[in-house]
Image (tube, rainbow, N blue to C red):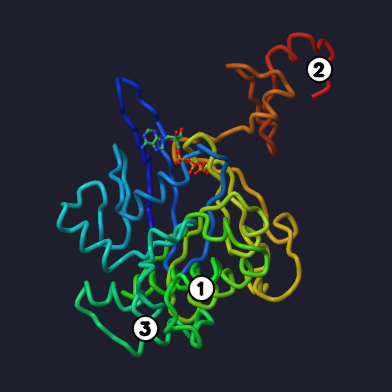
Amino acid sequence: MIECEGLVKIFKSDNIEVVALQGLNIQVKKGEMMAIIGNSGSGKSTLLNILGGLDRPSAGQVRVGEWNLLKITDEQLVEYKRKTVGFIWQNNARNLLPYLTAIENVEMPMLLSGNYDKQYARQLLEWVGLGHRMHNKLHQLSGGEQQRVAIAISLANRPQMLLADEPTGSVDTQTCDMIMDIFRRMNRELGVTIVIVTHDLSLASKVDRVVAIRDGLTSTEFVKRNPNLDLSAPGNHKMQDVHEEYVVVDRAGRLQVPKDFLAALQIDNKASMEFDGEKILIRSPKLLEGNTNDDN
Ligand SMILES: Nc1ncnc2c1ncn2[C@@H]1O[C@H](COP(=O)(O)OP(=O)(O)OP(=O)(O)O)[C@@H](O)[C@H]1O
């Protein structure tokens, strides 16, 4: 569904260049529910904005379904945003019209795209647990309820892919669980591919796969050990218990070594690497210089 290879995004302003994505590779299969985690400034939102057609990539390849987002025209981009992708932000004010009711908000994107379907709008609000509040104006709903309306809106045009940027960032734990359950249900029942960007590791444990981004590159990947494990079932699953951790190696053989590993071994700009037939060992050249007894 999503294929990014060597994806680069450079922001330029006042002669300053910020390289937000430095040749990022990521693949997401159709029907997958996965999360992207990373520290502030690692490039998560930049990636999501490019995938959502809100921002243009600077270089590299980025394909979503049949669309090549590097080459897409402005008119095609409008169609792409309307038909292929649904977006959910932490700050749901961007998705909602406060003077309309919940159902009118869900109907609005349907009207704009010429695919009005009142029955489906009702169905979506029932799915997110708001069937009884569909005629309330937005300001009469709580933050968590508004966030659920935003999820219903994002699905109004039956997108193939849902992009969620910190969707549970401003809600309590109970609402967070509810939102993740809704995502899981939409993923299973509608087959929507879901990509969630988050800082929250506990939330990451509720998805099939987690990709960690560091400094604009994919660094580590966590894959669910048991594909049949039901993560929506009660129980506080920790990511380490549920997922196997892998370091991402790109086609050119590059990988990212965590900064704390490098610091612990005082590896600065060079390291020594050797292959012992089974393992690849990376060591500090300084440690090797001081090590006269080569014990391997
Ligand atoms: N419009 C912009 N102009 C200039 N620099 C930008 C712009 N948007 C993002 N950046 C820079 O690109 C880098 C990546 O930002 P991005 O917002 O993608 O990170 P993030 O991982 O989503 O962070 P957060 O979790 O804090 O939202 C940062 O250094 C940021 O300052």
Q: Which residue corresponds to mark 2?
A: 294
Q: Secondary structure at mark 1?
A: loop
Residue that badge 1 annotates: 141
Query: Within the displayed image, which quadrant is ligand 1 positioned in?
Result: top left
Picture quarter with the C terminus: top right
Q: Nearer the viewer, residue 135 or 170?
A: 135
> Which mark lies nearer to you, 2 or 1?
1
The Cα–Cα distance between marks 2 and 1, rounded to whole angstroms, is 68 Å
The relative height of residue 286 versus residue 228 in the rendered view (above or below) is above
Judge whether 40 appears above or below 288 on screen.
below
Q: Does the residue at mark 1 contact the one at mark 3 (Cβ under 8 Å)?
A: no
Locate residue 169, reporting x and y percent: 57, 56
Is label 1's Cβ within 8 Å of ligand 1?
A: no
Residue at coordinates 45% horizontally, 58% vertically from top-left? 89
Which residue sits at x=37%, y=83%? 121
**Labelled pair 2, 1 in contact (Cβ < 8 Å):** no
Residue depth check, mark 1 versus mark 3: number of the one nearer the observer: 1
Tell me the crowding category of disc 3: few under 14, some 14 to 19, or many 20 or more residues within 10 angstroms, Cα based: many
CA distance separating discs 2 and 3: 70 Å
Callout 3 secondary element: helix
Horizontal and vertical percent position of residue 224: 64, 62
Q: Residue at x 58, y 64 (%)?
A: 208
Mark 3 C-beta to ligand 1 under 8 Å: no
The answer to which of marks 1 and 3 sits earlier in the sequence is 3
Distance from label 1 to label 3 (Cα)? 18 Å
Q: Is residue 219 above or below residue 35?
A: above
Q: Which label sits in the foreground, 2 or 3?
A: 3
Say which label, 2 or 1, has the lower sequence index: 1
**In the image, residue 116 lies at what x, y percent?**
25, 83
Tag 1: amino acid: Leu
Checking the image for residue 121, the label placed there is 3
